[in-house]
Amino acid sequence: MNKRVFSVLYMFMITLFFTSLVTGVRAVNEERIQTNQKVKLQKVILSVLNIPVEPDASSDDLLRLFESSVKKKEMNGRTMYTVYDPSGKTPARYAVIVNGPGFWGPIYGMVALDVDGAKITGIEFYRHQETPGLGARITEQWFKDQFTGLPLSQDPDKKTFFSLTPPAPEKSPRELDAITGATQTSRAVEAFLNKELESIKGFQGSNEEK
Amino acid sequence: MQKPPPANEIIKQGLWLENPVLKHTLGICSTLAVTNLLVNTLVMNIGLIFTLTLSCATVSILRNVTPMRIRMMVQTLIISSYVIIFDIVIKAYIPDISEALGPYVGLIITNCIIMGRCEAFARNNPPWPAFLDGLAVGAGFSLVLFAIAVVRELLGFGTLFGFMVMPEGFTPWTIMIMAPGAFFMLGIYVWIVRSFTMQFNK
């Protein structure tokens, strides 16, 4: 056989073989991967909405808890997760996904608001590429806890919801502690989160029907 | 065709004499990127050994059929297929670690150690020695990564495999977690090993 024709045919056959192999492995594991990603996001939503999860809950338990307590809907191009009060009638809190550029890559987070959209009740950062031990400390509890109770209204002078400043004893409620040694990440979080909060503001009210 | 070297020779070469990281400075990308935690290092090593042994064996099996002029394409195809399979498996079974390793698993494809071994050894030798060569070189790579990761995790976080081992009040050396920490450690190891071998060769 002509050498060139053989090369082409050989490459074709071997590509066909290996891509089929990869596709096969993918198909077998597809469902598992999807579930993993879903469970991961649901854990974040449950945690930001302050719904207690048992530490040894299986992914099935988690799924059931999520289905029973959280409702998902689209609003102004954003996905919103609502949790209802025990009677199941009135919404209690809701969570929205926020994202923006960090120092090394995009940061994805979730902000929970009370029903009037007046206050932040919780925050989580679930995907980021910040430096471990420095910028990655945005996922630590003390940092996230600072946002709890933050009013969702802008400072009239600065036009910002909050600012991240070096830790100091006397600070106004809008001044949260930045991460020492991670100035760039702190600045990035401050910038994108302020922007995102502004676009979320005014979501309330539209949330009341149902 | 020349005879393949004996098994013990292959192992000695891969682990020490021709150690990919210390002697050839290959695979530096992953050496720097994943050695800040022992768990990440472990998974990376398993991935590399899996890909390296199977790629070498496959390249070797196909060595007499593969046309010379397209052999690089074929090797890349084989390597990337195994890497993607590994990536899918860890995404499905250990999602947390998969998340932590991020793009570095996919970057095993471009790890020069693998194509280097395919080109230098596997395409001229029968499957079993090729497999063994992959295993030995992979183990050599893993040893160095572990040696770096132990120091980085211990000094950077005060932990080993996530367990706190340093005394209370220990201040973590943040520099060890970042890429420069890996550069320092790698430099120190290469220095030590070089000076030892030089003494032997005298």
Image (cartoon, rainbow, N blue to C red):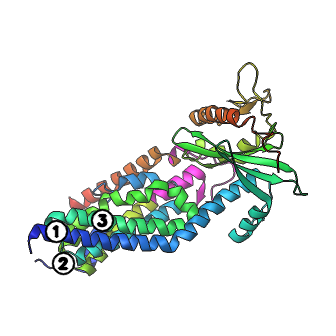
Q: Nearest the camera: B63 or A109?
A: A109
Image mark count: 3
Structural crowding at the residue carrying mark 1, measured as other residues with C-alpha within 10 Å and reported as few (<14), some (14–19) or many (≥20): some
Looking at the rendering, the stretch of residues picked out in magenta corresponds to: B147-176
Q: Between marks 1 and 3, how big is the CA–CA gap?
A: 14 Å
Q: Position of residue B131 (x, y in %)?
A: 30, 76
Q: Position of residue A113 (x, y in %)?
A: 78, 43
Decide if residue B29 is on the left or right side of residue B119: right
Most extreme residue toward the front is A209
Closer to the camera: disc 2 or disc 3?
3
Marker disc for residue B77: 3
Circle 1: residue type: Ser
Residue B134 seen in the figure: no
Q: Are marks 1 and 2 on the same chain?
A: no
Marker disc for residue B4: 2
Marker disc for residue A7: 1
Whether residue B166 is in magenta: the answer is: yes
Whether residue B152 is in magenta: the answer is: yes
Circle 3: residue type: Leu
State the residue at coordinates (66%, 54%). Answer: B167
Circle 2: residue type: Pro
